[in-house]
Amino acid sequence: MHPEFFQKYSHLSPGELFCLREEEKLRLKKQSTRAGLCVISFLLIQNVLSLFIGFIPSLNAAYFSDSVLPRIIEMTLYLSSMLVPFMVAYILLPEEDKVASYCFDKPLSVKACLAAVVAGTMFCTVGNFATDYFIALLSSFGIELSGGDYSLSETVEDFVFQTINIALLPALVEEFALRCVIMQPLRKYGDKFAIIMSSLVFALMHGNMIQIPFAFVAGLAIGYFVIATRSIWTGVAIHLINNLLSVILSFVFLKDAQAASTFYSAMNAVTLVAGIICFAVFMTLCKREKLKPNPTVLSNKDLGTAYIFTPSMIIAIVLIALFTSQFVEYTGVG
């Protein structure tokens, strides 16, 4: 318990404190259950619809022969599996949590938002470095990872669809899902806890071992800047720019692999230098909201245990582990 709240609870008897803790745990477990069910629904809807499409011969054949249909199907699968569960969860939120979830206001200041977006993009780059290190570490033990296939094309038409499917939609939908529906209601247990747990769910939603380290690091940064600027639009901008850079890099790679390598190195250098400068400006010169400490009678350990170890969250983690196992191959230590 934070010292600031010692007087608030010091008058309670041990029995009253116990009851209060159990009530807090129960409320937190309900939030965990909602999050876990959203992840489970995401996986089930995505896989069931994919199987359904695969069992329709005409649709399956068109998927591999048509240039537009695959992108429309991917868009439909994404919106059905990602947006629908979290939209339902939002609708079913208690009124108090629904009010807390609202973070669509303008940022505290334009300067703060711009600095946060550049700094946030830099932290996404750090997340990519973390993923590269993670892959290299596993590779040294003979474990190779893959991230699943995503068809690419050199056409402008396909670039537009990729921009929509990979950059625009995820930036809007995932920020609503993770930063509004999941993170904001958790802030009643402390901002740091809310950021970490929402980042964990964000990482799980990515569904493969390659993206999980990146998503967790990026989720921490985006969550912080959304709270610090009091606006989800900061997170949307960071998310959009990061994913758009990936789309551009993939497009350049198909045109010229050497140019893509140069572009990637230059992009990382500019992002890191500009990000460090903007982060320093944000932390020292910009108007921002400071993170609030844990205001409850629960310790950080109690909070983490109550949120992670619920049936739906455990099932979600197990399903993600099973799903990611298909992208893991043991090749043996060279």
Image (cartoon, rainbow, N blue to C red):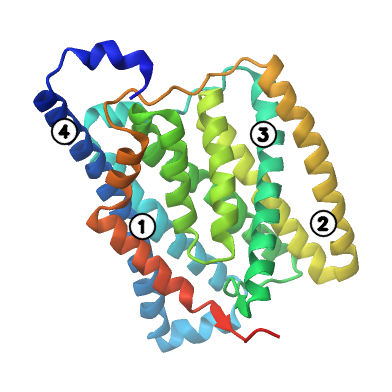
Which corner quadrant of the image does residue 146 belong to?
Answer: bottom right
- 102 left or right of 91? right
Q: Does residue 332 sit above or below 308 in this rendering?
A: below
Classify mark 3: residues with Cα within 10 Å, few (<14), some (14-19) or many (20+).
many
Q: Residue at x 82, y 49 (%)?
A: 267
- Secondary structure under badge 3? helix
Residue 44 position, x and y percent, is 33, 68
Name the mark on residue 39.
Answer: 1
Asked if marks 1 and 4 touch (Cβ < 8 Å), the reply is no
Q: Using the image as rendered, state which of residue 118 and residue 81 is in the foreground.
A: 118
Q: Residue at x 70, y 58 (%)?
A: 247
Asked if marks 2 and 1 touch (Cβ < 8 Å), the reply is no
Residue assigned mark 4: 23
Amino acid type at circle 2 is Tyr
- 255 left or right of 100? right
- Spatial distance from mark 2 to mark 1, Cα to Cα? 32 Å
- Spatial distance from mark 1 to mark 3, Cα to Cα? 27 Å
Name the mark on residue 117.
Answer: 3
Residue assigned mark 2: 264
Residue 116 position, x and y percent, is 66, 30
Classify mark 2: residues with Cα within 10 Å, few (<14), some (14-19) or many (20+).
some
